[in-house]
Image: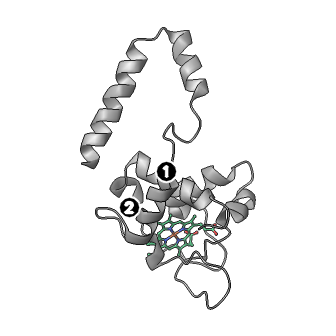
């Protein structure tokens, strides 16, 4: 299923791009938001967060997303990640930082934590699923 989506979106993009002259191509590329063009669905993002998808383990197995109470977790509590992420890496906005944290967890290590986050989300999740997770974590309060 994921492969079908990837092939379909790849085909669509190629199809759109081959129809464009170079300057139009640049206009299209400039218009695309970074890090990807997919628009996240936070409701689907929450379901991936809680239940995983395909081979990808649920994020909740390591991350809590509620504030207050007993908040031990293998990874940092992500209740305030939309806010926290704005200040993690200079020059990287919150969405870009969260995206990087999912696809390349070792790129920035949260102080006090080791590099033990599941490293294969970039392969196990589709571009759309990653955007859905980012949209979910960008929602105020995490949930
Ligand atoms: C096996 C445990 C584990 C799983 C599963 C896991 N994480 Fe993590 N995550 C960690 C650890 C440990 C860190 C802190 C070390 C680091 O920065 O990589 C972290 C860091 C993060 C950060 C940065 C937090 C901050 O305060 O800057 C984000 C965002 C994040 N994870 C999102 C996710 C999402 C989304 C998923 C599910 C797709 C997920 N993680 C799955 C363990 C995990």
Q: In 3D space, how far apart are the residues under numbered discs 2 and 1 (Cα atoms)?
A: 21 Å
Where residue 115 sits in the image (x, y, percent)? 52, 72
Where residue 10 sits in the image (x, y, percent)? 34, 32
Single out the residue that lies furthest toward the front: 43
Residue 42 seen: yes
Marks 2 and 1 in Cβ contact (< 8 Å): no
Q: Horizontal placement of 118 versus 136: left or right? A: left
Q: Which residue is drawn at 56% across and 10% down?
A: 23
Name the image quarter holding the C terminus: bottom right
Find disc 2 in the rendering and name its residue: 120
Find disc 1 in the rendering and name its residue: 41
How many numbered marks are there?
2
Residue 100 seen: no
Q: How crowded is mark 1: few (under 14 residues within 10 Å), some or many (20 or more)?
A: some
Which badge, 2 or 1, comes first in the chain's sequence?
A: 1
- Please tell me whether mark 2 sits on a helix, a strand or a loop: loop
- Please tell me whether mark 1 sits on a helix, a strand or a loop: loop
């Amino acid at each position: 299923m994921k492969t079908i989506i990837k092939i379909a979106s790849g085909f669509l993009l190629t199809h759109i791009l081959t129809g464009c002259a170079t300057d139009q191509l640049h206009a299209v590329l400039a218009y695309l938001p970074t890090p990807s063009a997919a628009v996240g669905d936070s409701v689907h993002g929450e379901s991936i967060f809680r239940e995983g998808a395909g081979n990808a383990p649920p994020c909740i197995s390591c991350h809590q997303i509620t504030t207050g109470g007993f908040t031990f977790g293998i990874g940092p509590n992500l209740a305030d990640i939309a806010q926290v992420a704005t200040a993690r890496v200079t020059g990287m906005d919150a969405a870009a930082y969260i995206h990087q944290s999912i696809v390349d967890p070792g790129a920035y290590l949260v102080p006090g934590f080791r590099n033990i986050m599941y490293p294969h989300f970039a392969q196990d999740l589709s571009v759309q699923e990653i955007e859905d997770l980012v949209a979910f974590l960008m929602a105020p309060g995490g949930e």
